[in-house]
């Protein structure tokens, strides 16, 4: 059978696909790249298309995508509809799923990222425990205080705001920020998903791409409108493509295409010219423009010359005028008109002209918005929308379409200047449509639920944009109030509000909106949401209630960045303005908790609960603070109430389980921690707490199983490694225990409990000199560490340093005053004294007397190891 080859007609049709004319050199270079193996130095991994607005970048990118598909490539297209790296990953994942390659693990983590991002405010409610619990070397200590720090690997970025902080303050603030988040998100992955999601998501994306690359000859990723997406994508993309052994391997059959108005940043990409293809686009040559016009049937020379004059060869405008297919030289005239005005004149159908103008008003269009914008019969709607989607200046973004800025701007200006009243009426009508849809979407939900709903926010934002364009009076305070609420959602939402203000200012020639939009965007770029909220706080002219809420939101951002004193000042000012603002009390309590000022934090939460008894988070936060302060009855009462109000809060269940364990109620502790783990199976903190409860119940098998699982989930958590080491030490598996102690100290070199426990373990294997060094370090880190002092006294005694042993024991007993000391702590010291040489009895006398006195009042209970 003869092989099937495409016919001449088919080949010609492919080359003329969708009327694409010109850019032959650029298309040929891209097509040829598929014929060059990645190992060949001529192969290019990155194509960067750049040029002025309207020069045809998006048209070319879409054509390159078509070429890639012809070569069997899997493709994904990303543009300014995304606002962050995780959103870009989500767009890639959705498009690959549509081509039969689901990124299941990436989708799971992206869903978790969105969920954790909404929980971020609660992340700071639980804070580290004090430096030492009374029951042995590792039951608490500074390890819990630092449990979330070591796994994060870096100080979280706090933007330009960091420049205003002392380096020591910044480092301390970063530590406290991490610990606050780690208390809520005990899982390392969850913490990373809040603080630096790219660290968690990027390796998974690369693994998914590697799997997909085995099933396809090529993968091509397109990043359009790079002048808008580059600020958050460029550094990440550079790292993914060029840095080895950070996130994993990027398959060699991946090609990246970026397209924007500017060249690539030479400071970042300048050293990689050997794998980058620079694709500058300029306006069409006269030959290319004439070719496109001829392809559309526009051949009358006077008309062609007029098109060339009006467009300057700018492809989007040449295509727009060619779409009307003017044929009569009489259509040429009035040299003062613009290309857009000429397009409207040359369009013979008045309905289509009206549709083109009306649909320029919304920033984005879908079928529903089209029906709202266009006044026509239902029968005509589908055909007109199909016609609109086919216009050369309309980009099809799947379920939405969008006008090219070069065409939309003059259409808006034409309508605004031609009929200012008509312009305002149409904008108000669209605002009313979006307001109605927004109201329908509310369905009795609370404000918190609504602002967490992205669909609702988009409707609110569209309504706001059109009201601003209509020139509605008294809008700014309301819009800026919405900006504050958008900041509560996150920086991506805040940026979209700022951009809507800037767009409305530009589109409606409204100076106030334009100024606010630009200044808020500049503040977000330079100092994050704290800086933008500072701008609003000082210039918006809010009433006391709105001012108090804005200051509370700014206080929260300052707290998250580690600027605790400034955060407290904002919360104080907010409460001066509105003494009944519950979120300000909760925010101040969290900040005070970060500063270890638990009593003041609890006082704030008392007031919050008094004002709003049904706020579960206030009860769970206060319950956790009571637990940290070892007021277990109060802790359990609060956590009971938190669970009554929200039975799905895994944190409240786990915290109550820990409180039960601290009271020796180990069965109740296991029951609560079981429930926490049902709600959140991958919850390392709950696993470690349950392991401690198993220890209390004398079940080392289950204790070890929980610790193994916790370490598998979070291998870089020092506390868990130390907990398992303690179990192994008690079981006599000393060498295995030492490995875990070494790992804990490697992860956190200021972990007093790990040093003390390793010292005790080294003593048991006869390494007393090393044991003494470890115990010295533990006491240096925590001078009031009772267990470490008794262990060091034991080592001193075994080394014959009886005066030092006496000093340590005396100091240890002074820490507890008249309270009894457990026999399990004193017995090893008594045994060591009994083994001492008879010649040392005189030296031992004071030590024996002190020990005998301590044992006479000892506790009959055995402390937890």
Image (cartoon, grey):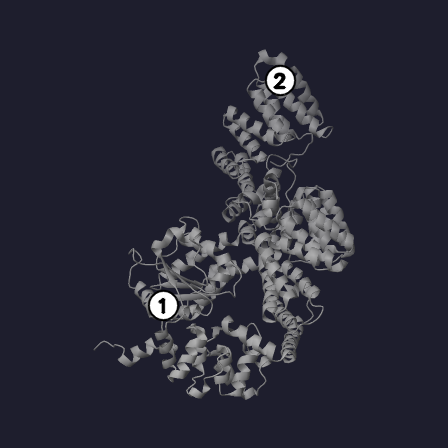
Q: Position of residue 588 (x, y in %)?
A: 71, 49
For image coordinates 74% across by 43% down, the residue present is 599
Measured as percent of width and height from the top left, residue 499 is found at: 58, 64
Q: Name which residue lies at 40% across and 81% down.
A: 304
Local crowd size for mark 2, using a 10 Å CA cut-off: few (<14), some (14–19), many (≥20)? some
**Is tag 1's residue or tag 2's residue first in the polypeptide sequence?**
1
Residue 746, relative to residue 180: is it above or below?
above
Above or below, comparing residue 203 to residue 58 in the picture: above
Report the residue marked by disc 2: 803
Reading the image, the residue beneath label 1 is 68
Q: Is residue 309 left or right of residue 434?
A: left
Residue 559, position in %: x, y? Answer: 65, 48
Q: Secondary structure at mark 1?
A: helix
Q: Secondary structure at mark 2?
A: helix
**Gap between marks 1 and 2 measured at Cα:** 81 Å
- Report the front residue among 341 and 265: 341
Q: Quadrant of the N terminus?
A: bottom left
Quarter of the rendering containing residue 7: bottom left
């Amino acid at each position: 059978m003869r092989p099937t080859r495409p016919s001449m007609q088919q080949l010609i049709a492919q080359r003329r696909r969708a009327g694409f004319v010109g850019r032959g050199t650029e298309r040929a270079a891209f097509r040829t790249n598929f014929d060059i193996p990645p190992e060949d130095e001529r192969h290019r991994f990155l194509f960067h298309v750049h040029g002025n607005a309207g020069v045809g970048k998006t048209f070319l990118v879409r054509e390159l995508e078509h070429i890639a598909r012809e070569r069997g490539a899997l493709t994904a297209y990303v543009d300014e509809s995304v606002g962050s790296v995780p959103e870009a990953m989500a767009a890639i994942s959705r498009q690959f799923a549509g081509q039969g390659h689901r990124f299941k693990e990436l989708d799971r983590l992206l869903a978790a990222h969105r969920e954790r991002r909404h929980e971020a405010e609660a992340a700071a409610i639980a804070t580290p425990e004090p430096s030492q619990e009374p029951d042995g070397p590792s039951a608490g200590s500074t390890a819990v205080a630092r449990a979330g720090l070591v796994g994060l690997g870096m100080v979280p970025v706090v933007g330009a705001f960091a420049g205003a902080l002392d380096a020591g303050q910044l480092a301390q603030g970063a530590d406290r920020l991490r610990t606050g988040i780690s208390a809520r998100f005990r899982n390392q992955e969850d913490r990373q998903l809040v603080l630096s999601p790219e660290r968690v998501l990027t390796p998974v994306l690369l693994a998914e791409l590697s799997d997909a690359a085995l099933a396809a000859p090529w993968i091509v990723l397109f990043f359009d409108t790079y002048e808008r997406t580059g600020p958050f994508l460029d550094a990440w993309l550079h790292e993914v493509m060029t840095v080895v052994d950070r996130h994993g391997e990027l398959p060699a059959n991946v090609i990246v295409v970026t397209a924007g108005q500017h060249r690539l940043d030479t400071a970042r990409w300048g050293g990689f010219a050997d794998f980058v293809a620079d694709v500058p686009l300029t306006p069409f040559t006269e030959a290319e423009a004439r070719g496109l016009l001829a392809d559309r049937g526009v051949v009358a020379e006077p008309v062609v010359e007029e098109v060339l004059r009006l467009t300057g060869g700018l492809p989007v405008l040449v295509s727009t005028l060619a779409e009307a297919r003017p044929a009569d030289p009489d259509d040429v005239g009035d040299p003062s008109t613009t290309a857009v005005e000429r397009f409207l004149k040359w369009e013979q159908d008045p309905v289509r002209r009206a549709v083109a103008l009306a649909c320029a008003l919304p920033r984005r269009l879908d079928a529903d918005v089209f029906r709202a914008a266009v006044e026509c019969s239902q029968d005509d709607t589908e055909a007109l929308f199909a016609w609109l989607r086919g216009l050369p200046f309309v980009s099809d973004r799947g379920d939405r379409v969008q006008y090219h800025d070069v065409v939309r701007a003059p259409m808006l200006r034409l309508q605004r200047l031609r009929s200012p009243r008509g312009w305002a009426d149409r904008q108000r009508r669209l605002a009313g449509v979006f307001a109605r849809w927004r109201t329908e979407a509310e369905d009795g939900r609370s404000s918190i639920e609504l602002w967490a709903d992205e669909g609702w926010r988009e409707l609110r934002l569209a309504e706001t944009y059109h009201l601003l364009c209509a020139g509605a009076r008294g809008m700014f305070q309301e819009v800026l109030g919405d900006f504050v609420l958008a900041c509560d959602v996150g920086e991506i939402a805040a940026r979209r509000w700022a951009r809507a203000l800037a767009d409305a200012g530009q589109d409606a020639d409204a100076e106030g909106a334009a100024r606010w939009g630009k200044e808020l965007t500049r503040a977000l770029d330079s100092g994050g949401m704290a800086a933008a909220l500072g701008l609003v706080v000082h210039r918006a002219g809010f009433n006391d209630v709105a001012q108090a809420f804005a200051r509370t939101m700014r206080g929260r951002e300052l707290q998250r960045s580690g600027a605790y004193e400034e955060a407290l000042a904002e919360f104080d000012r907010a409460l001066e303005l509105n003494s009944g603002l519950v979120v300000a009390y909760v925010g101040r309590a969290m900040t005070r908790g970060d500063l270890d000022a638990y009593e003041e934090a609890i006082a704030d939460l008392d007031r919050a609960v008094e004002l709003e008894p049904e706020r579960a988070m206030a009860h769970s936060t206060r319950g956790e603070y009571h637990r940290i302060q070892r007021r277990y009855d109060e802790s359990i009462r609060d956590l009971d109430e938190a669970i009554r109000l929200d039975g799905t809060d895994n944190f409240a269940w786990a915290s109550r389980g820990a409180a039960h364990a601290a009271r020796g109620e180990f069965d109740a502790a296991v029951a609560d921690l079981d429930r926490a783990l049902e709600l959140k199976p991958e919850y390392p903190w709950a696993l470690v707490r349950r392991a401690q409860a198993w220890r209390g119940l004398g079940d080392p098998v289950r204790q070890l199983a929980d610790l193994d699982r916790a370490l598998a989930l979070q291998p870089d958590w020092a506390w868990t490694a130390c907990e398992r080491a303690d179990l192994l030490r008690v079981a006599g598996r000393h060498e295995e225990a030492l490995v875990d102690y070494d790992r804990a100290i490697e992860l956190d070199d200021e972990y007093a409990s790990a040093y003390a426990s390793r010292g005790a373990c080294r003593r048991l294997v006869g390494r007393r000199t090393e044991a003494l060094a470890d115990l010295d370090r533990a006491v240096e880190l925590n001078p009031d560490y009772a267990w470490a002092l008794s262990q060091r006294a034991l080592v001193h005694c075994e080394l014959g340093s009886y005066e030092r042993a006496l000093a340590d024991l005396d100091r240890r007993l002074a820490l507890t005053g008249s309270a009894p000391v457990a026999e399990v702590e004193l017995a090893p010291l008594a045994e060591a004294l009994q083994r001492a040489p008879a010649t040392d009895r005189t030296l031992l006398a004071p030590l024996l007397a002190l020990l005998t006195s301590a044992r006479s009042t000892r506790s009959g209970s055995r402390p937890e190891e």
